[in-house]
Image (cartoon, rainbow, N blue to C red):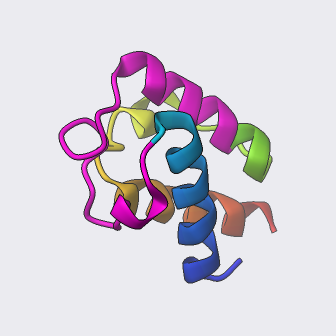
Amino acid sequence: MEREELFKKVAEIISEKLNVPIEDIEEDSHLIEDLGADSLDAFDLVMVFEDEFGIKLEDDEIEKLMTVKDIVNLLQEKVKDRE
């Protein structure tokens, strides 16, 4: 999956789950500070990403996810490993 395609899918999911306009979501957007996520939102997002991309995210990986870019980078790596 191409990075741009992956970013668009991640942005769609975040927009839907956090009720944030998709045009407000950029790679440098911070999940908590910019997009208003809380710990429950983050947990929900992780579950959706795991289901959507058929991957498993480890706790130590999840703890490092602060920005949309962090999510895209990790998912890109995980999806690539799966292929």
Q: Name which residue lies at 53% across and 69% down.
A: 7
Given residues 13 and 60, the one toward you in this image is 13
Is 32 a magenta residue?
Answer: yes
Residues drawn in magenta: 20-49
Name the residue nearer the viewer: 70 or 17: 17
List the single residue furthest toward the top: 40
Residue 9 in the figure: left or right of residue 37: right
Q: Residue 80 location, x and y as percent?
A: 68, 69
Q: Position of residue 40 (x, y in %)?
A: 45, 17
Image quadrant containing the N terminus: bottom right
Quarter of image, res 70:
bottom left
The quadrant holding residue 3 is bottom right
The image shows a total of numbered marks equal to 0
Residue 73 within the magenta-colored segment of the rendering: no
Q: Residue at x 46, y 36 (%)?
A: 18
Residue in the image at 29% along x and 34% along y: 36
- Residue 5 against residue 81 in the figure, above or below: below
Q: Is residue 31 above or below residue 43?
A: below
Percent x, y for residue 21?
Answer: 44, 54
Instruction: Specify whether 5 is left or right of 7.
Output: right
Q: Nearer the viewer, residue 50 or 27?
A: 27
Tell me residue 13's x, y (percent).
Answer: 60, 48
Residue at 77% across, 39% down: 51
Residue 22 shown left or right of residue 34 in the figure: right
Q: Is residue 39 left or right of residue 13?
A: left
Which of the two residues, 13 or 50, is positioned nearer the viewer here?
13
